[in-house]
Structures are given as structure tokens and as C-alpha cells.
């Protein structure tokens, strides 16, 4: 009988010790999915791009970062379209450009570097002669 009491006490002490050791570990895991401050939120902000097309061609719009291109969509001739993409698609180096590729031929056009901060938006006005297009950040 005495042996059973000792074994039961050992088990309860082992369980208490296991809880004491694992409690700090479990509390650390509970907060793992949260982000604090504004450090993680700026990458989640969306950037708006408004393209006003004065060209007679439908134009495909690309976001160019370094050597890679990301297709944003198409704006039809003589119309305006708004595109939205995550801020994280922009590189931190400032080497971001927009490219207009006319469907059905013609020369494509790449903008100058675009520097944008979270909360700002871009307006790109494409002219009949794409080299005369203008870009503004608001």
C-alpha cells in the first residue's frame, strides 16, 4: 500500500513539473501570430494605380521591378482603369517602373523610376504617342 502512495505522489509531482516547464513555452506560442506596431502593416497596404489611356490601342500594364515584370491588367483604348496591388510588390530599392505594352503592335513604353510610400497612389496618363505620357504620385 505504501508503494502505491509513493508512485501516485511521484506521478503528480512529475505532472506538476511538466506543467511548470511547459507553461512559459505555451504562453510564448500563443502570441506568435500577432504583429505589433507599424513594422508589419506597411507591407499589407494596397497601392492604387489609375491609368488614363488617351491612346487608340488597348494597352497591357506591367509593374517592373528589377528584371521581373508583374502583369497588372489591361486598359482599353480611350478609357480609364484603376488597378490595386499590395505594397510589398514594390521593391525597397526604388527600382520600380511601369510598362505600357500596346496590343496589336507599336512600341512599348517604360516609365521612369517610381518612388512611392504606403498610403500614396499613382496616376499614369498614357498619350497617343506613349513617349509623351506622364506619371504622378499623390
Image: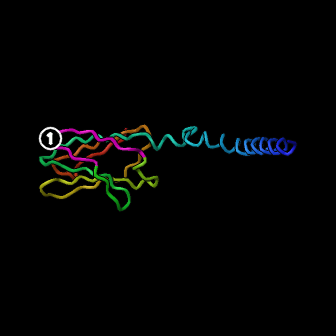
Observer-nearest of 42 and 77: 42
Q: Which residues are the magenta region?
A: 72-87
Q: Is residue 24 left or right of residue 116?
A: right
Observer-nearest of 35 and 106: 35
Q: Main secondary structure of the magenta part?
A: strand
- Point 40% across, 50% down: residue: 90
Q: Is residue 60 left or right of residue 112?
A: left
Image quadrant in which you'd find residue 30: top right
User: x, y percentage for residue 51?
Assistant: 25, 42
Asked if residue 81 is among those painted magenta in the image, a careful observer would answer yes
Outermost residue on the front side: it is 1
Q: Is residue 48 above or below residue 61?
A: above
User: x, y percentage for residue 76?
Assistant: 16, 43
- Point 37% across, 49% down: residue: 114
What number of labels is visible?
1
> Does dot 1 land on a helix, a strand or a loop?
loop
Quadrant where the image shows the N terminus: top right
Q: Is residue 94 left or right of residue 74?
A: right
Observer-nearest of 75 and 129: 75
User: x, y percentage for residue 28?
Assistant: 65, 43
Asked if residue 86 is among those painted magenta in the image, a careful observer would answer yes
| Residue tagged 1 | 78
Q: Is residue 103 left or right of residue 100?
A: left
Quadrant where the image shows the C terminus: top left
- Point 15% across, 53% down: residue: 103
User: x, y percentage for residue 12?
Assistant: 78, 41
Residues packed near mark 1 inside 10 Å, few (<14), some (14 to 19) or many (20 plus)? some
Amino acid at each position: 500500500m505504501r508503494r502505491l502512495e509513493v508512485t501516485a505522489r511521484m506521478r503528480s509531482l512529475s505532472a506538476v513539473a511538466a506543467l511548470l516547464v511547459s507553461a512559459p513555452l505555451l504562453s510564448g506560442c500563443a502570441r506568435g501570430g500577432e504583429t505589433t506596431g507599424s513594422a508589419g502593416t506597411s507591407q499589407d497596404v494596397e497601392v492604387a494605380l489609375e491609368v488614363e489611356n488617351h491612346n487608340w490601342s488597348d494597352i497591357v500594364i506591367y509593374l517592373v521591378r528589377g528584371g521581373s515584370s508583374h502583369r497588372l491588367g489591361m486598359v482599353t483604348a480611350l478609357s480609364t482603369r484603376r488597378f490595386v496591388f499590395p505594397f510589398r510588390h514594390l521593391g525597397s530599392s526604388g527600382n520600380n517602373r511601369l510598362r505600357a505594352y500596346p496590343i496589336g503592335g507599336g512600341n512599348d513604353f517604360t516609365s521612369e523610376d517610381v518612388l512611392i510610400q504606403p498610403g500614396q497612389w499613382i496616376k499614369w496618363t498614357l498619350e497617343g504617342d506613349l513617349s509623351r505620357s506622364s506619371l504622378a504620385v499623390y
